[in-house]
Amino acid sequence: MPDHYTSIETDALIIGAGPVGLFAIFELGLLEVSAHVVDALPQVGGQPGELYPDKPIYDIPGIPVCSGQQLVDGLMKQVAPFAPHFHMGHQVSTLQRQADGRFQVGTHRGTQFVARTVFIAAGVGAFVPRKLKVEGLDALEERQLFYSVADAARFAGQRLVIVGGGDSALDWAIHFATAADHAPASVTLLHRRDGFQAAPASVARMRELVAAGALRFVVGQVDGIEQQDDRLAAIQVLGPNGQTTPLPLDTLLVFHGMSPRLGPIADWQLALERKQLVVDTEKFQTSEPGIFAIGDINTYPGKRKLILCGFHEATLAAYAAQTIIAPGHDVPFQYTTSSTRLQRLLGVAAAADPGQRD
């Protein structure tokens, strides 16, 4: 069914698929609360997955060191028993309480949710790509201009120009320059200088491909575009010598990084302090009962913006939400090490001692 016809009912809607949002799935799952997750990014991971997937993290309890992507991968494995529903590439735009006490939540793509509780785990806001500001270019977005790659095969046989000097730009340049299947006709990497903010191994590999003639590298900036029959035919590249030259292409991929925006959250009539949601420290509930804020999006006395703190917030918020979702149905506090009920939920009951009881 198309997104704009979709209406989904859920006990918990989590806005944000970063580490804290993912851990909220786990804690809700232990309380037998199912969840749907919405994120503006095309893939799970939030800030660690998008901005520092390969950088080491040293302060996750019990894990001396892991990369941002390894943390995300581990959390995804941890929540797998609860079969969460992900809606990626959806930015939540509206949130209103209904007469029955539930929340009507809508996304920019038309998907509608009706949720008993809402968890806002949006980090420092929705991450959106930093766009290339060139006159006439916006109209070509999702036609010949892209800020992310959802399907690499669609660029087969095309002349690609990739703009950027970070990990994403170099990784995709290397990918397309070495693609065996669905190979582009040509790949050009364009960056404003001959220096990069990317992993040294990626830079070395990029230079190897340039030397081998598999990848072209151009120093310069996009200064304008040339169109033919309502299509992008070339970009004008301003070089370090001050001269502008045309660079023919079929598709332009731009990777200038991501920037966080609070976006529609600012219009939801929730108490804010310096663009952060004010919460209590018992339930991590916002000024609107039933709406919780966890992770970097919230503020309270003594707040520390650490992933491990977000995990704690998600845990207490999940217990508070359960009392709203199933009032009068108290779930006994149990430990995963000894509770056969929890172990069954996690799919590890067979590993438990048969003599154990809840």
Image (cartoon, grey):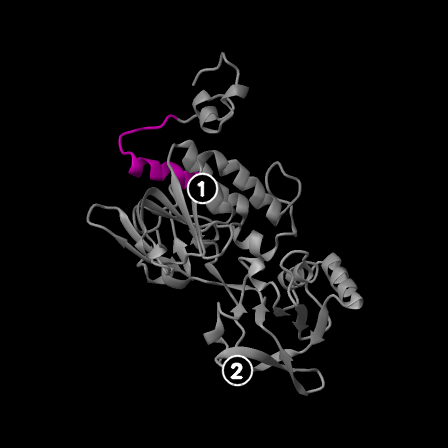
Q: Which residues are magenta?
A: 315-332
Q: Main secondary structure of the magenta part?
A: helix
Left or right placement of residue 253 versus residue 323 in this view = right
Q: Amino acid at mark 2?
A: Gln
Q: Amino acid at mark 1?
A: Ala
Residue 196 on the magenta span:
no
Residue carrying label 1: 24
- Residue 330 lies in the magenta-colored region: yes
Query: What element does badge 1 sit on?
Result: helix
Q: Locate residue 39, reporting x and y percent.
A: 44, 53
Q: Residue furthest top?
A: 355
- The secondary element bearing badge 2 is classed as strand
Q: Quadrant of residue 74?
A: top right
Residue 286 appears in the picture as rendered? yes
Q: Which mark is residue 253?
A: none
Residue 337 in percent (x, y) is at 52, 24
Which is closer to the viewer, label 2 or label 1?
2
Image coordinates of residue 254 in percent, x first then y, are 58, 68
Tell which residue pokes out farthest to the left in this image.
99
Q: Which residue is mark 2?
A: 228
Whether 134 is drawn above or below 215: the answer is below
Q: Would you call the spot at circle 2 few (<14 residues within 10 Å), some (14-19), or many (20 or more)? A: few
Q: Is residue 165 above or below residue 281?
A: below
